[in-house]
Image (spheres, rainbow, N blue to C red):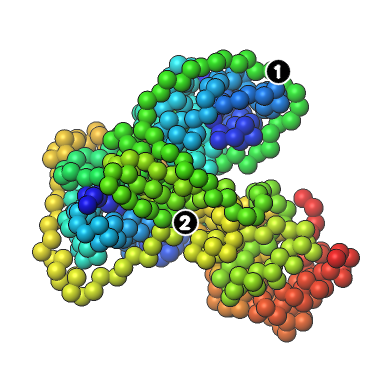
Amino acid sequence: MTVLVHGETPQLSARLVTAGARYLQGETFNILHTGDLPPETLNLYGGAGASTVYRISQELSAAGPAMIATTIAMTARETNSTAILLSSTKYGREIGPRVAEILQGSYSTECTQLEKTDSGIVVRRLVLGGAYQAKLLMAREPYVIGLQAIADVAGGAGQAPRVVELSAKVEAPRIELVEVQRPEASHVDLERADFIVGVGRGFKKKEDLALAEELAKVLGAEIGCSRPISGDLKWMSEDRHIGLSGKRVRPRTYLALGISGQVQHLVGIRDAKLIISVNIDPNAPIMSESDYAVVGDLYKIVPLLTEKLRERLGRR
Amino acid sequence: MPDIVVCLKQTVDIYQLKPHPETLEPQFSQAQSKISDFDLNALEEALRIREKHGGGRVVAVSAGPSVNQLLIREILAMGADEAHIISHPLMASADGYVTAKVLSKLISKAGRWDLILCGEASLDNSDYQTGPRLAEIFHLPHLAYVSRLEISERSIRAWKVMEDGVHVAECSLPAVVTVGLEINTPRLPSLLMIRAASKKPIHEYKLADLGLGEDDLKPYVQLLELKALKVERRRQKLEGTPEELASKLADIIVEEGLARR
């Protein structure tokens, strides 16, 4: 089986190859790459285990998902790929359905496991607000799969992949990207954080988030939030949003401050090893989803906790 | 004055859903159905565009195993002008491919249109498929995860919420737009609107009316198993004065929370 891989960044493509190879052992993984291809990127691909890199020199992503989807479909056809691995990011979810529609293959996104069987590829994904796991049979080739690429890139120097230049003469409906309004905060990698302090509607004002930030600083933790904080209130940037339509995180510890625990948020923290919550409402759903649930006022508890931890941990 | 098609899905209300204690399968019969949350945002946005631009039709389409007429009446009461629906038992096993195919046929019955609006994902499956698939079927540009939309004579500008920030993008009409919860707050229909809606047309189709057969409803992706995920948490409730609680929490965090993996 030949697998064509395309993530929105080289890092994601490499992670998809590593994660894909774990489930589909012995298959050939090729990467579709657009834009410049510096040696370090080629090394990254080689280290991950890619056999061939198909390169299109133009940067297509700004023209929108239809352009890139059509290019992927075209390349998959030319390379006889039976599976196409995409990232389960927002970008991946815009292009995946189009690729499946063009190739008339089966499509599934946010897949957490893949298994090759005689009747197709069996995948698992969360549905119904993330509270249930569906086992699905993708019965028709090609299999277009959005994979949760949480694996690290398999390190080491692999064989340098072969590079094949493709010219993309693709016709597809375009969108024009006018501007990207980046949040002022620097990029956070919540998916890899060991300790996350999550903030929710229990905070009454944006300024009060400083309480959580102080605590996070002492703990060396990252800050994440529930949807209202980044969405409706815009107190935090979207890259800190944990939940069904945001990030899925897997820290050692998740400390939920003023988070009620709607199912959409819970799905994002399901893989946390330890969940501790502080909430003033003893009936909040987060209480039964925590290992330790503190019933109390975060405005009183958090400053005291920060102080105690500062003493215990000997940090500023 | 753009004419707008809004795709709406009836889903189970996932917040009412409880797993069977032994099989862990969801007990669908014990939960009510509702219109998928994001789809109501799509409808609301269509109504606001119509109000702002002083005209244009808003047409609702829905396909499912048994589309509930009462819920369609609610959509009409909110302000949609007409509805085109199809119910077929095989839609219970529809995947994104089948759903988009059937919806595209319904949309073709809905007269002329400039814009298709959908929720970015459905409440039950969160597949994020219908919008981009319809865009591909009709060969149109698609703007996804939209939190703000501006529409002019022949083009639209959208604020797309992406992981790295907000992407402002434009495309020409006709187009497909999928919206998130942030874009608006859907209105609640008044009694007067509900009464007025009883006269609005609901067009119900059979498969053959859409040029489809039962073979067309065979999904490419089949559900093999559906089970509640059980993550057992210790559920220790801690109570006390803020001082006591902060001390206990500090202990827990130092002893368990900060341990390396």
Regarding residue A72, the answer to whether it shows in the image is yes
Picture residue at 74% right of the left edge, 30% below the top:
A155
Q: Are marks 1 and 2 on the same chain?
A: yes
Q: Amino acid at mark 1?
A: Gln
The alpha-carbon separation of the residues under discs 1 and 2 comes to 42 Å
Picture residue at 46% right of the left edge, 26% below the top:
A72
Expressed as whole percent of the image width and height from the top left, the position of residue A270 reads 59, 56
Q: Amino acid at mark 2?
A: Gly
Is label 2 in a helix, a strand or a loop?
A: helix
Picture residue at 41% right of the left edge, 55% below the top:
B148
Q: Please tell me which of labels 1 and 2 falls first in the chain.
A: 2
Regarding residue A49, the answer to whether it shows in the image is no
Question: According to the image, label 2 marks what residue?
Answer: A129
* Other-residue count near label 1 (Cα within 10 Å), few / some / many at <14 / 14–19 / ≥20: some
The one of A183 and A120 positioned closer to us in this rendering: A183
Instruction: Name the residue furthest right.
Output: A314
Point out the image quarter for the C terminus of chain A. bottom right
The chain letter under disc 1 is A
Picture residue at 39% right of the left edge, 48% below the top:
B157
Expressed as whole percent of the image width and height from the top left, the position of residue B188 reads 29, 70
Q: Is residue B40 above or below residue A187?
A: below
